[in-house]
Amino acid sequence: MRDQFLFTRRKALIGAIVVAASSLVPARAYAQGLGLGSILGKASDSALDQLAQPGAFYNDEDVRIGLPIVGNPRGGLLGSLFNAGRKLGILDGINRKINDAAGAAAGEAKPIFRAAIDDLSFSDVPGIVRDKEGGSKYLRSSANDELHTKVSPLVDTALSEIGVYEQFDGLAEQHSFIRDAGLNRESINKSVTDQALDGIFAYMGREERKFRDNPLDGVGKVLGDLF
């Protein structure tokens, strides 16, 4: 009976502390206390580890990076020319190289995502908590421009080392439709970085959902962080 009483009292005390903490601490601290920072960090690490594997971007059609086409790639003369180039085999290999470059950049991006997560100021904690991919969505909406700026040099280095820029230059000398696309190092880099971030956040949201659904990694972590 005494043990039952002590357990009930302890449970009530914990509940009171949680309520008090939620009203006294800043939103960011409360969110971090709920384990959101830890969950997001794990989600980003896991997503980047997966996409850094050889062929990961290219082999997953949901995140596969397309050729960097200026304008609408699905319509108009330019889109038709690129489609013709694919059919003729002119562009064979370069698409895979682009995806390999994105994977190489993902392998170097962990510290960048971790820093962005640490700098988050959670302003809508209830919404983030309710949505199982809320942390990833919030990171994208609040830090996407910063992430793009910091991931872009990684993509640029990878594109250069894998030989994508050089291959585009060679194709442009041989085929007018490549020259007419108006592609340059900056536009290629931007297109690949944009699409790489799309893929990273898609994987990150999926991983966040998995961590939240895992009771040992979710509730257990919450209690461990709060007390």
Image: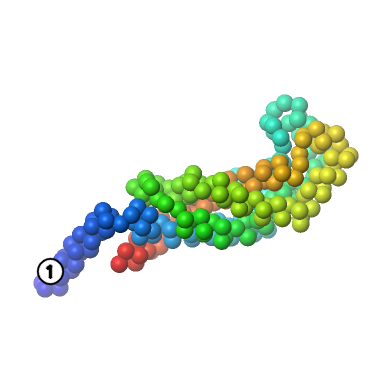
Q: Which residue lies furthest to the top in this view?
A: 76
When asked about the image quadrant of residue 20, the answer is: bottom left
Residue at the location (51% across, 55% down)? 116
When asked about the image quadrant of residue 110, the answer is: bottom right
The residue nearer to you, when weighing 71 against 121, is 121
User: Residue 68: percent from the left, percent from the top?
Assistant: 71, 40
The residue nearer to you, when weighing 152 against 205, is 152
Instruction: State left or right for residue 10 relative to residue 106.
Output: left
Residue at the location (63% across, 60% down)? 108
Label 1: few (<14), some or many (≥20) within 10 Å?
few
Q: Residue furthest left?
A: 1
**Image quarter in which the N terminus is found:** bottom left
Residue 208 in sight from this viewpoint: yes
Q: Residue furthest right?
A: 174
Residue 132 in sight from this viewpoint: no
**Image quarter in which the C terminus is found:** bottom left
Q: Which amino acid does label 1 sit on?
A: Phe
Instruction: State left or right for residue 178 relative to residue 22.
Output: right
User: Residue 188: percent from the left, percent from the top?
Assistant: 72, 43
Q: Mark 1 points at which residue?
A: 5
Residue at the location (76% across, 53% down)? 160
The residue nearer to you, when weighing 136 against 81, is 136
